Amino acid sequence: MDLHLKGRLVLSRETDIPGLEGFLSESNSTVLAKGAPEGMGAEVISHRLEGNELHLEIRSHESVRAHDAMLRLKNAFAAKFGKEFKVGVRDIVIDTYDITFDIEKEPVHDVNLPFVERLSFEGTKATIHLVDVEEEFLQGNYIDRMISRVQEKIEGQYYEGKGEFWKEMWTSPEKPVKWSDDPTDAMLDAGWLKQGPTKGKWFLRPQAAAVLRAMERIAVQEMLLPLGYQEVIESHFVSFDIWLKTGHLEGSPNEFYYAFEPETRDPAAWERFKDIVKITKKVPEDELLKLVKPSNAGLCYAQCPVTYWSFQNKTIADGSLPLLLFERAANSSRYESGGRHGMERVDEFHRIEVIFIGYQDQIMKVREDLLEKYKYVFNDVLDLEWRMAWVTPFYMQQAGQVGIDDEDKMIKGTIDFEAFLPYRGDRDTSEWLEFQNLSVLGDKFTSAFNIKGQKGEVWSGCTGIGLERWTTAFLSQHTIDPENWPEGFRKYLPELPEGYDLL
Ligand code: ATP
Ligand code: ZN
Ligand code: MG
């Protein structure tokens, strides 16, 4: 890393400083070299005293950052000249700061980054050009994070348009195709569903609700309770500090639904708003924005972050490991926008999230047990045509975290469960529906929340059982006529509710 800074020490008064020259050149081999390998310290390469400002140009490497060199000079200056000339350093100003670092690959196209004046590339070197740099910026470790972000964005450019990684692991036998209707349309026609009230939401009338709840009972009674999972109930609201820790805030901010608290509960403050509503029978949007605080939380996107948060800074007793939990109270909300379709891609869905924490060998066993139960449920209870695929993304493979060619090495990563939807076309060419997944995440979240076992590091994993997706997969294959439903499922829903007739 090469750093090049131009800045100023703003002095408390205008004065001549005899010995300045000597002080600066001595600093190069003393204060500015401290802690750095031979020849790798910071160096003042030019200076100029103008009025009460000492202009400095500094070059350095990573061991003494040029902005740290400015701080060191400020202190050394005060120690050396403060008493003698009654002059101190009032302020440090950084006018320009260029940071050059190595990159593994050349960018495919432009890279944008906030805070920078300009980003330039030359072969496998990148330079961040900063101007008028604030103090806070330098203290907050921003520069290192900006460098990582540039590297990450370049890496990402190589995977654009490559699609998702996908490797088949197991496929069920083919099943007879009973129909090729879209079950959402069929349910709408049969009066089981109503769309709305806002985008991507549904009102489930008794028949659809009964099917969804039957799916839930199957998951809980056939799998989770027999395997020893305990239920927890969490808040629907996820504070931003939780998502900052899990990485969701940088990963999915475009899919969140955001929550806003009122600025005040004082009725007087809301009087004008109420008046306008009463008179216009419309929502005065500008008025509303003035009455709510900036958002500090979002609606649940997946249940695992809040569950991990509940163990923050805790050591889990060995007797409680592996810890096996599930949550089904918080609905997941996601802004799917153009991707919405039917019941299978909605903005608010019902999902049981299964979360497990334990030592690495325990986690492997937990996954085996879950896979075995899933196979039983999808084969023998729901009688589905389905498959499993290893879908761990390229970047994780890149980072050498997982192997893909050797089954034994599928340690950390994600398995998608996909069902054939006859309404989408041929089984060989159509896109199958991901109806759930199962991830082993290593120490990603346990480290983020500092969760430990008595013997040290623990791993975690989770599997999201999407009830709308189970329902869609099931009805796409077995129709919405209970006569066609497999015995295993009918045990859980012997009779559909009558529903009601609307005129
Ligand atoms: P997709 O690639 O389909 O968007 P995802 O990777 O976003 O899925 P995850 O975040 O891994 O999904 O969520 C796990 C499970 O939650 C999915 O397997 C699915 O069962 C369910 N799910 C996710 N998004 C939706 C949605 N919009 N509507 C209904 N269920 C969903
Ligand atoms: Zn999860
Ligand atoms: Mg998604």
Image (spheres, grey):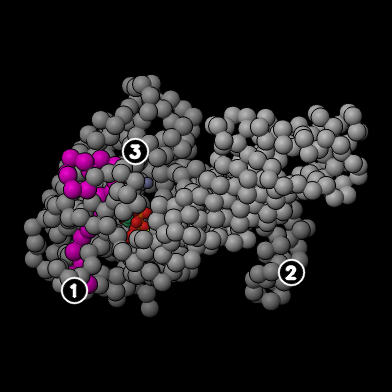
Task: Give x and y (percent) for residue 417.
Answer: 23, 54
Q: Which of 10 and 26 is in front in this view?
A: 26
Q: Nearer the viewer, residue 202 or 318?
A: 318
Task: Give x and y (percent) for residue 244.
Answer: 52, 46
Bounds of the magenta segment:
404-425
Residue 260 in sight here: no
Which label number is shown at residue 442?
3
Earlier sequence position, callout 1 versus callout 3: 1
Q: Quadrant of residue 408?
A: top left
Q: Distance between the residues labelled 2 and 1?
A: 54 Å
Q: Residue at x 43, y 31 (%)?
A: 451
Q: Is mark 1 within 8 Å of ligand 1?
A: no
Q: Distance between the residues labelled 1 and 3?
A: 37 Å
Secondary structure beneath disc 3? loop
Residue type marked 3: Gly
Report the residue marked by disc 1. 425
Report the residue marked by disc 2. 275
Earlier sequence position, callout 3 versus callout 2: 2
